[in-house]
Image (cartoon, rainbow, N blue to C red):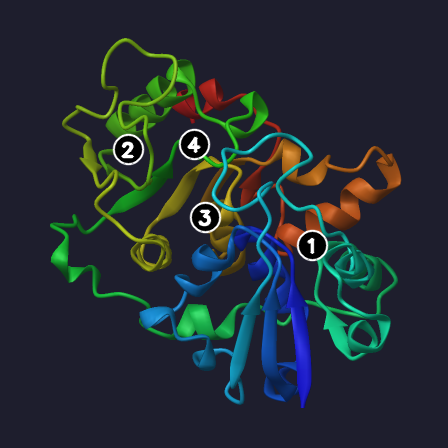
């Protein structure tokens, strides 16, 4: 019987789940969430049922704080708990802390870098029907586009007008459809005076699809183009060598200032990275010529 702590975002959670063993999953009877991403993590499985991942889960607890409870993101304030020891800030005693398994980013990435953990993949997500996407009028051939995340509107994570126009050029050239997924206050895209997604090559599901819809759409797509987000992490896990994954992930791999860590962090989020399957730190405008 184990209590596990998650302090992460949804994309982090996907990578951490891949690095947990089946024995760890099965041992969890209680989860503590100290993150504003709690609802997003739960909504990544059908019916918000985390027992589908942790079959012996009986209870969960939420630790809420103004810095992450639904506020717009500010750099440095999204996740204030770096390890379970930070729970002392919320009055949790050391005896209780010692009985918690810490699945925060920092200890898991450290274990991964020291070869104490290895990726097993997202088998549940990959092999389970997460959502019935037949409700959408989907073409036979499409790529998924996730242009930005309101959660983290950083330039290095986001597609802007020139990027999107290049993607539209790619769609025209290859005679395929782009399916746009997002939940956003900026449905027309960022830094544009017109709605770039009002286009014959686009099926715009902005604010019409859930997280599980998005994951299931990616599983059946030719590829993914988009921002650094939980969707780009998911695409990196489920895509094969022929899967186009062009994600603006620079910030994902550079959140540490230690150059030696960048490869470790890249493999933490994108274990299937290869020059063929994932175009990393590439000018998006080049996709229109590919």
Numbered disc 4: secondary structure: loop
User: For the residues carrying marks 1 and 2, which lies nearer the camera in this image?
Assistant: 1
Quarter of the image that includes the C terminus: top left
Q: Distance between the residues labelled 1 and 2?
A: 32 Å
Which sits earlier in the primary sequence, circle 1 or circle 3? 3
Vertical position of residue 189 compared to residue 140: above or below: above
User: For the residues carrying marks 4 and 2, which lies nearer the camera in this image?
Assistant: 4
Residue closer to the observer: 129 or 289:
129
Residue 90, numbered label = none
Numbered disc 3: secondary structure: helix
Is residue 98 visible from the viewing direction of this image? Answer: yes
- In-image side of 34 versus 259 (left or right): left
Residue 13 position within the rendered picture, expressed as x and y whole percent measured from the top left:
58, 59
Q: Residues within 10 Å of mark 2 (few under 14, many from 20)?
A: few
> To which quarter of the image does residue 95 belong?
bottom right
> Which residue position is annotated with label 1?
268
Which sits earlier in the primary sequence, circle 4 or circle 2? 4
> Which residue position is annotated with label 3?
231
> Which residue position is annotated with label 2?
174
Q: How far apart are marks 1 and 3 (CA)?
A: 15 Å
The residue at the point 45 percent across, 48 percent down is 231
Which sits earlier in the primary sequence, circle 4 or circle 3? 4
Q: How far apart are marks 1 and 4 (CA)?
A: 21 Å
> Which residue position is annotated with label 4?
148
Which sits earlier in the primary sequence, circle 1 or circle 4? 4
Is residue 54 visible from the viewing direction of this image? Answer: no
């Amino acid at each position: 019987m184990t209590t596990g702590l998650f302090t992460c975002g949804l994309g982090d959670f996907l990578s951490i789940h891949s690095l947990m063993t089946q024995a760890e999953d099965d041992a969890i009877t209680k989860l503590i969430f100290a993150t504003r991403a709690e609802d997003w993590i739960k909504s990544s499985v059908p019916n918000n049922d985390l027992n589908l991942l942790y079959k012996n889960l009986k209870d969960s607890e939420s630790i809420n704080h103004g810095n992450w409870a639904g506020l717009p993101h500010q750099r440095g304030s999204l996740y204030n708990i770096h390890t379970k020891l930070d729970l002392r800030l919320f009055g949790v005693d050391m005896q209780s802390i010692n009985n918690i398994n810490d699945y925060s980013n920092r200890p898991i990435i450290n274990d991964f870098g020291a070869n104490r953990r290895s990726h097993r993949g997202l088998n549940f997500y990959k092999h389970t029907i997460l959502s019935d996407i037949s409700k959408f009028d989907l073409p036979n051939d499409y790529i998924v586009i996730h242009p930005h995340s309101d959660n983290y509107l950083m330039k290095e994570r986001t597609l802007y007008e020139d990027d999107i126009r290049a993607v539209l050029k790619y769609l025209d050239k290859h005679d395929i459809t782009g399916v746009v997924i997002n939940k956003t206050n900026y449905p027309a895209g960022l830094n544009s005076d017109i709605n770039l997604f009002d286009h014959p090559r686009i099926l715009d599901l902005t604010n019409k699809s859930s997280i599980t819809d998005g994951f299931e759409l990616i599983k059946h797509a030719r590829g993914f183009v988009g921002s650094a987000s939980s969707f780009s992490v998911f695409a990196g896990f489920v895509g094969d060598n022929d899967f186009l994954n062009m994600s603006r992930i620079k910030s994902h791999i550079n959140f540490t200032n230690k150059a030696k860590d960048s490869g470790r962090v890249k493999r933490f989020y994108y274990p299937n990275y290869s020059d063929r399957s994932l175009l990393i730190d590439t000018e998006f405008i080049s996709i229109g010529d590919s």
